[in-house]
Image (tube, helix red, strand yellow):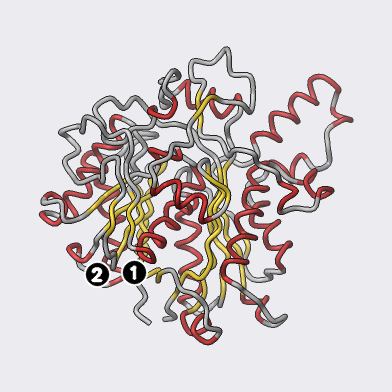
Amino acid sequence: MERVVITGIGLVTPVGIGLRESWEALLAGKSGVGPISLFDCSAFRVRIAAEVKSWDGTRFIEKKKLKEMDRFTEFALGAAQMAIQDSKLELTDEERDEAGCFIGVGLGGLFTLEKTKQTLMEKGPQKISPYSIPGIIANLAAGQVSMAHGLRGPSYCTTSACSSGAHALGEAFEWIRRGRAQVMVAGGAEATITPVGIGGFEAMYALSKRNEEPERASRPFDKGRDGFVSGEGSGVLVLETLSRAKKRGAKIYAELVGYGASSDANHLTQPAPHGEGAQRSMKMALRDAGVAPDQVDYINAHGTSTPVGDIAESQAVAAVFGAHATDKKLWVSSTKSMMGHLLGAAGAVESAICALAIAEGKIPPTINLDDQDPSCSLDYVANTGRERRVTYALNNSFGFGGTNASLLFARHEG
């Protein structure tokens, strides 16, 4: 099977637009959470979120094209363009048939959906835009990226709640290593800070209500956590065969070596007891790569800041990694403490963080971890980032419906 490496990274996040801006903010422990500005939330119990600041789609997209797309698609196009530029990727016409795009999206175009419903109610069906459906449907992130960059290989959307971006990368990995594609532009995108998005999660009592201290609201593994903070953004990676990357002298951030996916088959929103499904997902990724648990140096945790979820993931990590984890030789951090939960984009952005941790030997912290929950007994790199040579890094992404994905990344040694 082909070996698969990461040669480009593009990030649009609540802490920065671009790889370097986002990465440096995360290493510094900067929070991107603040009051909601995208709509009037005065009637809501939750009035905070992690928004992408100062977004200007025309930086990446021709102005007349913007009417075709929702905010999540704009994010995907921006992240994809940055990833391709970072990779210095150039494709021959023949290679375009073996270059594809998978972008995971959890909910699709809520901005367009809500705007369309308002137009329907106020002005009637004849005033609905012909771009409404293309703006709403989730696969148009991958479709627009494919069209923008002439990627004629497979193009589709993985939709698996908060695992969507991770599953997109895992499926891209499979296409390449089986020899069915040479290059994949893959990741996740999400933009759901809307009345329906916030109102829906609020109704489930899933969100933090720490409105007066937004930067301290997302606090994974802390005793005071009271729910996640909704975020938005996109992460896109360029994956290609190792042989192709070496032939063109590409910069290699890391190698993707293992992919695990499982289902809790347990509950609509709650994880299986002791994170049993997460355990299987992580074990599968390790087995796929032929890597022993004690070889892993860092885990970017799902770590959403929910009371039940953080405990279940901690128990799952302890069960899979044993003394390596409980003796705190394995470092775990949740960058959702700074970016909030990017839902369908989370797994892709956090996979990029794993690749950067390997490439630069730096681990971003879990901020707001002031009073660690004794039920979460691992080393979560509390509040301050650290340096460490990382040979293997694991990303976990878990979603409603009991869906789990784990991706294992390795240092590439020439």
Give percent across and percent down for residue 216. Answer: 38, 28
- Would you place residue 166 above or below residue 303 in this image? below
Numbered circle sitting on residue 291: 2
Residue in view at x 51 percent, y 37 percent? 231
Instruction: Assess whether mark 2 and mark 1 are in contact (beta carbons under 8 angstroms).
Output: yes
Residue in view at x 46 percent, y 68 percent? 173
Residue 103 picture quarter: bottom right
Q: Is residue 317 shown left or right of residue 242?
A: left
Q: Is residue 224 shown left or right of residue 340?
A: left
Residue in view at x 49 percent, y 20 percent? 46
How packed mark 2 is, by other alpha carbons closer than 10 Å (few <14, some 14-19, many 20 or more), is: some
Q: At numbered mark 2, what does the secondary structure look like: helix, strand or loop?
A: loop
Residue type at mark 1 is Ala
Residue 220 picture quarter: top left
Residue type at mark 2 is Val
Give percent across and percent down for residue 402. Answer: 37, 43
Give percent across and percent down for residue 80. Answer: 62, 59
Q: At numbered mark 1, what does the secondary structure look like: helix, strand or loop?
A: strand
Q: Which residue lies most toward the top here?
A: 43
Report the label total.
2
Residue identified by numbered label 1: 410
How packed mark 1 is, by other alpha carbons closer than 10 Å (few <14, some 14-19, many 20 or more), is: many
